[in-house]
Image: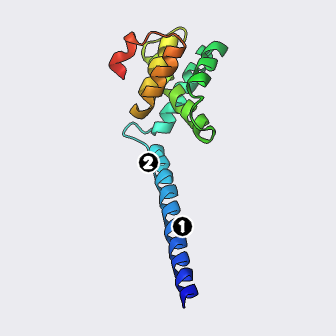
């Protein structure tokens, strides 16, 4: 009798855990689906990211790529490429809006601030201070 009670609880916990994991996975899949839906202009959020990256690809030097890699280093490796792609898209958007002839450090920092959630800004501030980059021009973005 006691053994069957433990077995029932084990089954119940298994199904609850399975349901929870499936809900979490479904949430992330649904977010990706929403980003893929076209907006009023006919392009999705991901299409615009790709457009901005392709239009500014010639502006990226090895030095600027290295700075972006340093900034996204704390992102878990599983999500690092996605984060880098999103941030590069925002940097490209800024560079195109300003009709920049070359990509500057300020474009990368502004793009990183605008593309990342507020919870990551604390780490970004610490990293920029370690690199001895003045945060004063970017305070309004935080």
Kindly tell me whether residue 88 is visible in this rendering.
yes
Residue name at image x 49 percent, y 51 percent = 28
Secondary element at image label 1: helix
CB under 8 Å between discs 1 and 2: no
User: What residue is shown with label 1?
Assistant: 18
Q: Which mark is residue 77?
A: none
Outermost residue, front direction?
2
Q: Is residue 8 above or below residue 123?
A: below
Residue name at image x 52 percent, y 61 percent = 21
Residue name at image x 55 percent, y 81 percent = 6
Secondary element at image label 2: helix
User: What residue is shown with label 2?
Assistant: 34
Q: 96 or 74, which is in the foreground?
A: 74
| 123 on left or right of 62 | left
Q: 82 or 141, which is in the foreground?
A: 141
Pinpoint residue 105: horizontal percent, then vertical percent.
52, 12
| 74 on left or right of 33 | right
Q: Is residue 124 above or below residue 77?
A: above
Kindly tell me whether residue 108 is visible in this rendering.
no
Quadrant (top left, top right, bottom left, bottom right) of the N terminus: bottom right
Label 2 Cα crowd, 10 Å radius (few <14 / some 14-19 / many 20+): some
Q: Is residue 90 above or below residue 81?
A: above
């Amino acid at each position: 009798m006691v053994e069957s009670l433990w077995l029932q609880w084990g089954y119940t916990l298994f199904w609850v855990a399975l349901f929870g994991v499936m809900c979490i996975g479904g949430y992330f899949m649904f977010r990706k689906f929403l980003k893929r839906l076209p907006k009023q202009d006919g392009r999705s959020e991901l299409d615009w990211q790709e457009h901005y990256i392709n239009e500014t690809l010639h502006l990226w030097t090895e030095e600027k790529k290295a700075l972006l890699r340093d900034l996204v280093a704390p992102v878990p490796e599983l999500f690092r490429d996605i984060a880098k792609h999103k941030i590069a898209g925002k940097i490209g958007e800024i560079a195109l809006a300003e009709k920049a002839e070359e990509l500057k450090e300020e474009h990368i920092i502004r793009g990183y601030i605008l593309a990342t959630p507020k919870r990551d800004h604390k780490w970004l501030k610490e990293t920029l201070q370690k690199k001895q980059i003045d945060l004063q021009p970017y305070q309004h973005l935080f």
